[in-house]
Amino acid sequence: MSAAAAAGSYDVANTTWGGVDGELARLEAQAALSFEEELRIMRDLGLTRAGPLLELGAGSGAVTRRLRAAEPGLDVIALDVDAGLLRHAGGCGAPLVAADGARLPLRTGSVGGVLLRYVLQHLTDPAPMLAEAMRVLRPGGTLVAVEVDSMLWGLADPMYPELASVHATMAQAQRGAGGDRQIGRKLTRLLRREGFTDVVLRPFAATNDTHPTAAFAPHLGPERLVPLVASGALSMGELALAADRWRRFLADPDAWVMLLGFAAAGTAPHGGPAPSVPETVPEKPARFWRNAQ
Ligand SMILES: C[S@@+](CC[C@H](N)C(=O)[O-])C[C@H]1O[C@@H](n2cnc3c(N)ncnc32)[C@H](O)[C@@H]1O
């Protein structure tokens, strides 16, 4: 990590089985599963119309690459606090900026849109990042935050109630590290609190009607539980149980799954950010970002 960041629950090396390589594959699979649905919502909300679009917490660029391919005319800036992870986003035409999203090295009012995808759930306090996003947005610009809510993760048939405590442990572990997997229900209120207007919530779903069941492995498979066994939060027995149920689910030709995501959007009001928003980063006169690749 090259930029000093506020404490949060994202740990690239300990999110899933296989360390950083495993996480790179998970981020890619996660984007492949729902990007089309998310893109439809982003277009509908006008996020792709007025650039540049700041992808805040772009990670390895799984979405950056897809956005650039789907909207070649849209300037995208990929920003992340983890310079090592961000390096993987290179080569798709988006400038890479390594910085803390709560201290953006961008000029006030310099971007037309901000995308925060699966970032806010990792922050101890999302407010400073949202305030910075508001600051760098042009009046009338759009912010979209894509998130989950662990109590509304979706539906599966068959269900395995015996895994409820395993999922609760996962949410608890993220909470213990400063994150919040129940952020879905708070999104619109967070945006309104920061002064965004026209706040809306657009749920979206991915099902195995249109994706192979195996594509849901990053969400439903046991790999994500491995770091929890390593940290002692879960037992080997619980991991084995989860692996067994995932195997059964995969082998069942009639099994059905739907995962839910939530895209919340808000508009930066005309008249600029609220006076209480601090100007945390000195402005650069000529360019709108400090290139820190
Ligand atoms: C779960 S990953 C999501 C990555 C990407 N948005 C995607 O959907 O593939 C969360 C990302 O948020 C980044 N992040 C966490 N805290 C941050 C901060 N304070 N400033 C900038 N990025 C941050 C992490 O480094 C990580 O890349």
Image (cartoon, rainbow, N blue to C red):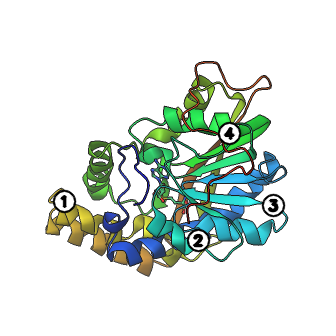
Q: Which residue lies under the disc numbered 3?
A: 74
Whole-angstrom CA distance, mark 2 to mark 1, is 33 Å
Residue 259 image label: none
- Disc 3 vs disc 1: which is toward the camera? 3
Which element type, helix, strand or loop, lies under badge 4?
Answer: helix
- Disc 4 vs disc 1: which is toward the camera? 4
Pointers 2 and 3 in contact (CB under 8 A)? no
Residue 243 at what x, y percent from top left? Answer: 29, 73
Image quarter in which the C terminus is found: bottom right
Which amino acid type corresponds to the residue marked 4 in the rendered image? Answer: Val
Q: Is residue 82 left or right of residue 14?
A: right
Q: Is mark 3 within 8 Å of ligand 1?
A: no
Rendered residue at 65%/50% (across/down)? 115
Label 3, residues with CA under 10 Å away: few <14, some 14-19, many ≥20: some
Q: Earlier in the sequence, mark 4 or mark 1?
A: 4
Which amino acid type corresponds to the residue marked 3 in the rendered image? Answer: Leu
Q: Which residue lies under the disc numbered 4?
A: 136
Residue 89 image label: 2
The residue closer to the viewer here, 255 or 4, is 4
Label 1, residues with CA under 10 Å away: few <14, some 14-19, many ≥20: some
Image quarter in which the N terminus is found: bottom left
Rendered residue at 44%/54% (across/down)? 3
Residue 234 image label: 1
